[in-house]
Image (spheres, helix red, strand yellow):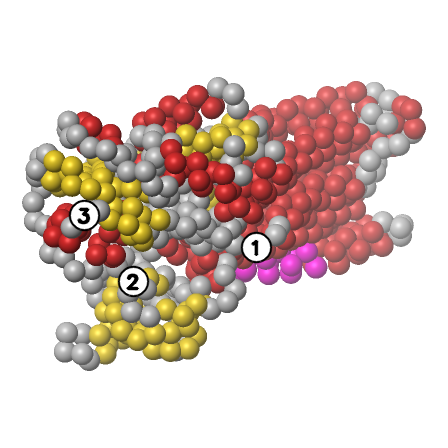
Amino acid sequence: MKKLRLNITGMSCVNCANAITRATSKLDGIKSAKVSLADNSALFEIEKGRDIDELQKIIKAKIKKLGYGVCNDYSELAKAEQNAIKSLLYKLIASVILACVVMYCSHILGFYAGLVAFLACSLSVFWCGFGFLKHAFLGIRAKNYDMNVLVSLSVLCAYFYSAFVFFVPEIFAENMRYLYFDSPTMIIAFVLFGKFLEANSKQKAKDFLKTLMDLSPRTAILIGADGKEKIIDVKELKIGDVVSVKSGFNIPSDGQIISGGAQIDESSITGESLPKYKSVNDSVFAGTTNINGFINVKISKSIDNTLLAEILELLQDSGSFKLNISRLADKIANVFTPLVIALSFITFAIWSFFDLPLGIMNALCVLIISCPCALGLAAPIASVCAISQAAKQGVLIKNPSIFERFNGAKYIVFDKTGTLTNAKLSIVKSTLNDNDLRLVAGVCALSGHLISKAICENVKIYEKASGNLNELAGLGLEYENGQILIGNAKLLAKHGVIFQEPCVKNLSVLVAIGGKYRGFIALNDSIKADAKFTIQSLKALNLEPIMLTGDKQTNAKSVADELGINSFFAEVLPTQKLEKIKELQEKGGVIFVGDGINDALALAQADVSIAISSGADIAKDAGDILLIKNDLKASIYALKLCAFARKIIKQNLAWAFVYNLICIPVAAGALYPLFNLSLNPAYGAMAMSLSSVCVVLNSLRLKAFK
């Protein structure tokens, strides 16, 4: 299924995003639409067989008709956002000056003072506040009642009432001749102030995304077949091309070094502060920097499929992903504005019986103080901050829904080989003769399994086999319909081979040739240096560690005892791992950490899954979290960050709900009968503006999480 991403400008609250979502979802050929206020983006899923270019034109036209702008790429969006912030600043300064003029004139009696106040107020409303009025008009036309409608209604009501009182006072009773020119100007000034702070804060939340965008070089030095160098656009690079990367230059795409050596700064990708020396056969990533040395790199991935591209895609998707609690907040926001308008009329009707000026002020205050924006921003802005902060530390959060699912986790289940151990096996004993050992290595050369690779690396001199190989997950290798069997006891028993299982503590690979047992190969795998610390730290988080492995009982027990894991299950097949995860889930939430193909089912089933970057691609695809640095300690950081992000989201939502529950009744005059207190609409505007700013600033605490 094709996906289309667009960058949108001009959205001011969650109802703007909801309006675009509703309008574009109805278009023919669009399967789904997700619009994010947090990062001003939209992600569309296009139905199969549809022309994406034609649909893009239709979608853009629809969005522009609603009154919003569309940018072609992120750099254009960033520039548009910077221009919007500058425009906000200029209008904010102008609105403050105009508000001061109106406030000064309101204390001077006379026609000319009133005229100056009217002109200053007009300039504030129709120039400084033009953006609110424009989006309110377009929103009403599209049946989308957002924050702009509330601001515009309150401002225009006060403005036109005051204008009529000033120019034609005779149509009003004596006790109704009040001027409120100060209210619209103060409202515009405070709302612009809040929007300016919010826009700057949202920019800070996305600063890591912009940093990553800047890492990708625009050009590359291609080495042709004749050995000559040529500067080309990175988009022209193909898999198999060889590029030259000189000192001080960024690597254009993922690949493997084929000559030379250099100190590579990978801090932007892995979070590792110290540069790492890399030479022939080492892998390098797009966006990392050659700080000292000279290398030639053979490109292994297109620029759209690099690790850097994957990180960028995840960060961009994070703002569009809807948590369940976000969907509830959006539904509330959709009916919020009509309810507030109705409440404003009720407030006016009730208070005007007792005091008309008070009724007008309270009704205006209800309109202006209500804020659906904080509800819409509560979860998305926190998700963006958490995911970008995690990426800085070498942790990719691929699925933001874990912020909800993480709650209640009781067990953390580990695979053994490659997860708790280094998966660097060496042969410590073999009962095979040299010919059989070389024959086994030749068959293993057809397999990509870690054990197969280890045997090949240790034997070194062998001839690669050319027959048919069948890899059986959790059992081993069948070559030429079982003519050669390389695996565990279950594999040999399955084929009826009579054998005596070796009494060794290490990992043993049994070999049968021609239906007869020939011997075994014993391999040893060392435990990762940070594994014990990780297990102890996770226990401190009240998580019970469990180990699942396809390895035999003696090897599993040795590793479990050394790491302090009390519960482990050995000799389990991938399907048995899946069943064990399901069994544990009946008792509590399960987090699974793995790296291999045989972990994919368990990773997909677990409530939260963590994949090790050094593992198989299928395992990475299944994981909710990917540890780029292959650092087990990073799992502790990831889980703590998820818990903190969940806490921030709950705080944001609580603040948004409590703010409206308290402030709307106060604005409606709930305190007036008891304390003779009523809220000025200008202060209501300030409170409304700061409510969204508080949500964004609270989310920015995630940027400092270590």
Question: Could you tell me how far apart the alpha carbons at marks 2 and 3 are, in whole angstroms?
Answer: 38 Å
Label annotation for residue 203? 1
Along the horizontal axis of the image, is 174 left or right of 147?
right
- In front: label 1 or label 2: 2
Foreground mark, 2 or 3? 3
Q: Residues within 10 Å of mark 1 (few under 14, many from 20)?
A: some
Q: Nearer the viewer, residue 531 or 281?
A: 531
Residue drawn at point x = 25 percent, y = 57 percent: 457
Label 3 packing within 10 angstroms: few (<14), some (14-19), many (20+): some
- The type of residue carrying mark 3 is Leu
Q: Amino acid at mark 1?
A: Gln
Give coordinates of residue 348: x percent, y percent.
76, 25
Of residues 463 and 40, which is closer to you in this image? 463
Q: In the figure, is residue 444 to the left or right of 55? A: left
Give the spatial CA distance, label 3 vs label 1: 64 Å
Which residue is denoted by mark 2 in the rendering?
A: 255
The verdict on residue 84 being magenta is: yes
For label 1, the SS is helix
Q: Which residue is mark 3?
A: 432
Viewer-nearest residue: 199 or 124: 199
Q: Quadrant of the N terminus?
A: top left
For the magenta stretch, what is the residue range?
Answer: 78-93
